Amino acid sequence: MTDTAPVNVPAFIADHRILDDTIAAPRGPWSGIVHAGDNLTIIDLFGNQAVDCIVYDAHDTGIRYSAPDTIASQRNVYLTEGSVLRANTGAPLMTLVRDEVGRHDTIGGACSKESNSLRYGHHTVHQHACVENFLAEGARWGLGKRDLVSNINWYMNVPLEPSGVMGIVDGISAPGLSLTLRADRDVLVLISNCPQINNPCNGFDPTAVRMIVSSPLS
């Protein structure tokens, strides 16, 4: 954690006080508290990386991100600038206040050993997956498997056809593109920088992302 703003932060937060500036390694996790009014910026450093995310109320983790409540409230399955991430109570958790990509997935779910072996063959059962990242990082905050819920896939391209058929295809992000979320209350954010190598969600080549927590000066 540092009070010194690093170089090359997005212009949107250039005048913010930087509270945390961390590189999440390829396939690795990240987590942190973002206080109400502060921002979390995620930079897709190399492009075409999927970033799995779950959000909880920092003071009551029984209040957590809900894909059905979010989708129903905004009447859109995709997240984009202006989208409000809603909890299972309907309460707002975070708002996507800036988005350089334009569309993010909230229905594709997170990869796991079980889903990998079912989709790609038993030989993949030992591959590290997002569920393991969520469990490892969630344990730091007293969370377990029963606390894992539906997640967001930032940057992941999941086209949905009128018939209801969905797919995971090559991404629409590019190196350096970013998004910024404003916390509407104190929230705990869990991130899995997706290790998936069996589908094109990250070009079969997981890469690093940058996580910046910042506070407006005014």
Image (cartoon, rainbow, N blue to C red):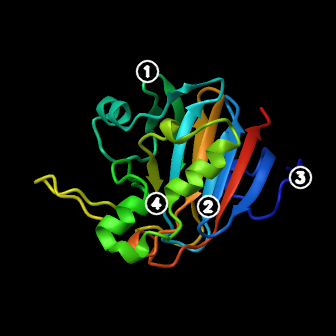
Residue type at mark 4: give it: Tyr
**Disc 2 vs disc 1: which is toward the camera?**
1
Residue to which mark 3 is pinned: 4
Secondary structure found at label 2: strand
**Disc 1 vs disc 3: which is toward the camera?**
1
**Residue 59: in sight, yes or no?**
yes
Q: Residue at 71% of width from left, 52% of height from top?
A: 212
Residue to which mark 1 is pinned: 89
Residue type at mark 3: give it: Thr
Does 191 sit left or right of 211 as displayed? left
The mark that comes first in sequence, 4 or 1, is 1
Residue 139 position by quadrant: top right
Label 1: how many Cα within 10 Å (few below 14, some 14–19, many 20+):
few
**Marks 3 and 4 in Cβ contact (< 8 Å):** no
Residue to which mark 4 is pinned: 155
**Residue at the outermost left position:** 163
**Disc 3 vs disc 4: which is toward the camera?**
4
Q: Residue at 30% of width from left, 44% of height from top?
A: 77
